[in-house]
Amino acid sequence: MRPFAYAAPTTVTGAIAAGSAGAGTRFLAGGTTLYDLMKLDVETPVAVVDVSRIAELAAVDTSGDDELVIGAGAR
Amino acid sequence: MHALVTVNGREMELTLEPRESLLDVLRERLALTGTKKGCDHGQCGACTVHLNGRRVLSCLTPAVQADGAQVRTIEGVAAAGGSLHPLQQAFIDEDALQCGYCTPGQIMSGLGCIAEGHAADDAQIREYLSGNLCRCGAYPGIVAAVRVIAATQDPEA
């Protein structure tokens, strides 16, 4: 695997800023696809932004009367 | 990157390179070789460990994602005195292994399956262990071992 810079922001704003840093930046959540393809040199990002530590994405909100909100990072 | 990882209850300070998988760090740097490398592509389940209580494939988990987390491997399953965990004993009793290479992953996955409450019957056990391959085909014994321990309702005993 090629070397890459790693960042793990804890806010959406921070992730967007880190993800906009330049070409060759990829977001990493579970890693099932990206990390595996990096092992195979199919994906060769220069920077990886780990979004797994963003609490505001991790929630499942069932408080609404007629809507269910599942955060993009909910597990 | 500096990281603090608790492995089987022991806090470890590690300097991690972002490319390192949790599997490689466990095996090559911490000498915890109970966790097996089968395919290294997330297809076989041999590398299953628990990360903050949730089962993960350590081959597809960058070690840096374990910073600040609790990792439990097969080495952390038996009691401190070395006596086997009931699920480990059940694997022996139910003839749930032949070569044994997949067994650490099967046991970590079995513990997860039971703790998640997904071991109600054989069909459900098979579904929730479907990420763990056994090329010896010891599946009937594996399902039986998990079924027996799930029935005791005390997976952490």
Image (cartoon, coloured by chain):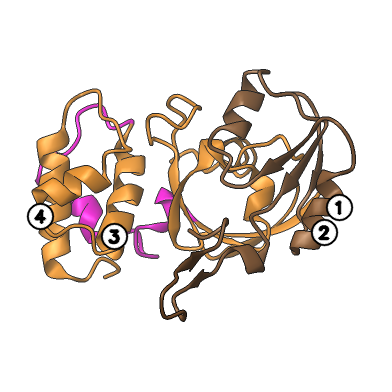
Chain colours: A brown, B orange
| Drawn side of residue B139 relative to residue A8, left or right | left
Closer mark to the observer between disc 4 and disc 1 = 1
Q: Amino acid at mark 2?
A: Gly
Q: Chain of mark 3?
A: B
Image position of A9 with respect to B15: above or below: below
| Distance Cα–Cα, label 4 vs label 2 | 45 Å
On residue A17, which mark appears?
A: 1
Q: Amino acid at mark 3?
A: Ser
Few, some or many residues within 10 Å of mark 1 (<14, 14–19, 20+): few
Closer mark to the observer between disc 1 and disc 3 = 1
Magenta stretch bounds: B72-101
Q: Chain of mark 4?
A: B
Label 4 in the same subunit as label 1: no
On residue B121, which mark appears?
A: 4
Q: Amino acid at mark 1?
A: Ala
Q: Chain of mark 2?
A: A
Few, some or many residues within 10 Å of mark 3 (<14, 14–19, 20+): few
What residue is shown with label 3? B83
Image position of A26 with respect to A64: above or below: above
As helix, strand or loop, the secondary structure at mark 1 comes to: helix
Q: Residue B95, can we see it?
A: no
Q: Position of residue A46 (x, y in %)?
A: 83, 31
